[in-house]
Image (spheres, grey):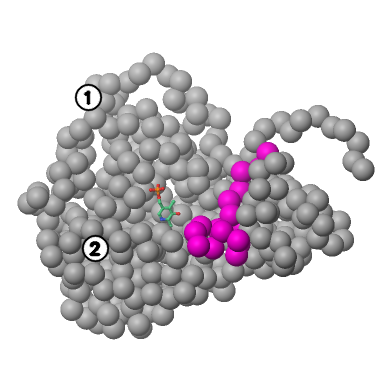
């Protein structure tokens, strides 16, 4: 039996969003209320938009929506796709399924190209479906399965079939985390949200538009009003927003982006890769391998050893004050999900490996103490 000990210092968010937020970023939210039409408010919007573009690395124009990532995605879709057009949705998990449902509800002629959860999309299969399509919806980092789909190959093959195709990518957990080169890869609109890689509280969505695709944006013709991003982009470029933006969150976002922009993107991507690899290595050492063959640096989606279920592991972690997640329906029991997305460093990855050891030990899984932490160290390139 373990001796009694102090309660843990804090609850840890080790889920793939919302994520831990840097204390300095949270402090930005304690400032006196700024007005979004004041010189300070206008400057804050311009600054945050410029930093979003810098983090992307290509000269795309950012629109910040007051919504979660789903709202930003809907805005990108309705603003780039005329009524009744053909939309192809490549799906292999919960989030990519959402975009197909969204396109159907919005009345687009929707073709689904589906793979089972945990598998990888086949670029040629997706491309073949895009021959006569207007828009392709594709998810880069599928947070429900932990797969990092080959966005470069998918967008490349699809554009080779159909050069006029518009590619909208859900990069909600890959932006600022995984290698992402939209101009080179042929991605026209990149969508993300504040509570994922940019480590800001929830409430903001982002769309970064390729300069050329902006000429093809659908003017407001009944395709949404609040999420008409043609209007929004025009306004934000001129320094204002048609509606009241979540200006406090925009100020906080700007501060959070400073940390991510303090190193070259390649350094950031490699760091996040190693952290996620450390979680996968820790899982393997405990008999819980990754579900996907090509893993996302945003999240480790791990299959617990039978008879343990994903829900049991997530529940045990929650009892320990660690907010991880089970799989998403209908795969709650297939997997559990842990993550170093957001404000997390290499020692957080090592800490999570230790936490997993405690959880698995208390659930009766046999292993040698230190195995997961050692595996995590090796994945981090040490030891
Ligand atoms: C979180 C997430 C979403 C949904 O974003 P919200 O901000 O919750 O609307 C969509 N796609 C992926 C891949 C995600 O991880």
The residue depicted at 68 percent of the width and 63 percent of the height is: 304
Question: Magenta includes 322?
Answer: yes
The N terminus: image quadrant: top right
Main SS category, magenta section:
loop
Residue 333, position as x, y percentages in the image = 60, 61
Question: Which residues are drawn in magenta?
Answer: 321-336
Q: Earlier in the sequence, mark 1 or mark 2?
A: 1
Residue 52, position as x, y percentages in the image = 36, 46
Which residue appears farthest toward the left when viewing the image?
Answer: 221
Mark 1 secondary-structure assignment: loop
Mark 2 secondary-structure assignment: helix
Residue identifier under label 1: 37
Pick the residue in front: 99 or 212.
Answer: 99
For residue 198, above or below residue 369 = above
Is residue 183 at least partly visible in the picture?
no
With 365 as the anchor, is 309 left or right in this view?
Answer: left
**Does the CB distance between marks 1 and 2 fall below 8 Å?**
no
Front position among marks 1 and 2: 2
Residue 345, position as x, y percentages in the image = 63, 46
The residue depicted at 20 percent of the width and 74 percent of the height is: 133
The C terminus: image quadrant: bottom right
The residue depicted at 44 percent of the width and 25 percent of the height is: 29
| Structural distance between the alpha carbons of marks 1 and 2 | 37 Å
Which residue appears farthest toward the top when viewing the image?
Answer: 32
Q: Which mark is residue 104?
A: 2
Pick the residue in front: 305 or 135.
Answer: 305
Question: Magenta includes 241?
Answer: no
Is residue 369 at least partly visible in the picture?
yes
For residue 253, above or below residue 369 = above
Give the quadrant of residue 155. Answer: bottom left
């Amino acid at each position: 039996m373990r001796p009694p000990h102090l309660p843990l210092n804090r609850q840890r968010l080790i889920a793939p969003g919302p994520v831990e937020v840097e204390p300095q970023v949270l402090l930005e939210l304690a400032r006196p209320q700024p007005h979004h039409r004041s010189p300070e408010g206008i400057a804050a919007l311009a600054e945050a938009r410029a930093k979003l573009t810098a983090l992307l690395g290509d000269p795309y124009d950012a629109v910040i929506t007051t919504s979660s990532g789903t709202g930003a995605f809907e805005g990108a879709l309705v603003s780039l796709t005329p009524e009744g057009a053909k939309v192809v949705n490549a799906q292999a998990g919960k989030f990519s399924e959402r975009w197909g449902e969204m396109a159907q509800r919005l009345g687009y002629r929707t073709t689904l190209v589906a793979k089972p959860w945990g598998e990888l999309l086949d670029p040629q299969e997706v491309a073949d479906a895009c021959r006569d399509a207007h828009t392709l919806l594709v998810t880069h980092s599928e947070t429900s399965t932990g797969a990092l789909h080959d966005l470069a190959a998918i967008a490349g093959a699809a554009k080779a079939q159909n050069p006029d195709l518009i590619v909208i990518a859900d990069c909600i957990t890959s932006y600022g985390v995984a290698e992402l080169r939209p101009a080179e890869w042929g991605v026209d609109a990149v969508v993300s949200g504040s509570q994922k890689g940019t480590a800001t509280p929830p409430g903001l969505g982002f769309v970064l538009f390729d300069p050329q695709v902006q000429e093809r944006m659908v003017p407001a013709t009944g395709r949404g009003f609040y999420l008409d991003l043609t209007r929004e982009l025009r306004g934000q470029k001129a320094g204002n927003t048609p509606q009241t933006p979540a200006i406090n969150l925009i100020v906080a976002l700007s501060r959070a982006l400073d940390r991510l922009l303090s190193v070259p993107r390649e350094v950031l991507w490699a760091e996040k890769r190693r952290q996620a690899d450390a979680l996968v290595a820790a899982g393997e050492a405990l008999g819980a391998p990754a579900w996907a063959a090509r893993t996302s640096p945003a999240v480790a989606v791990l299959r617990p050893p039978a008879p343990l279920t994903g829900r049991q592991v997530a529940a045990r972690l929650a009892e320990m004050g660690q907010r991880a997640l089970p799989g998403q329906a209908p795969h709650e029991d297939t997997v559990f999900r842990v993550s170093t997305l957001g404000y997390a460093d290499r020692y957080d990855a090592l800490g999570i490996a230790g936490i997993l050891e405690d959880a698995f030990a208390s659930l009766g899984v046999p292993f040698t103490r230190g195995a997961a932490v050692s595996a995590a160290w090796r994945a981090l390139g040490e030891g």
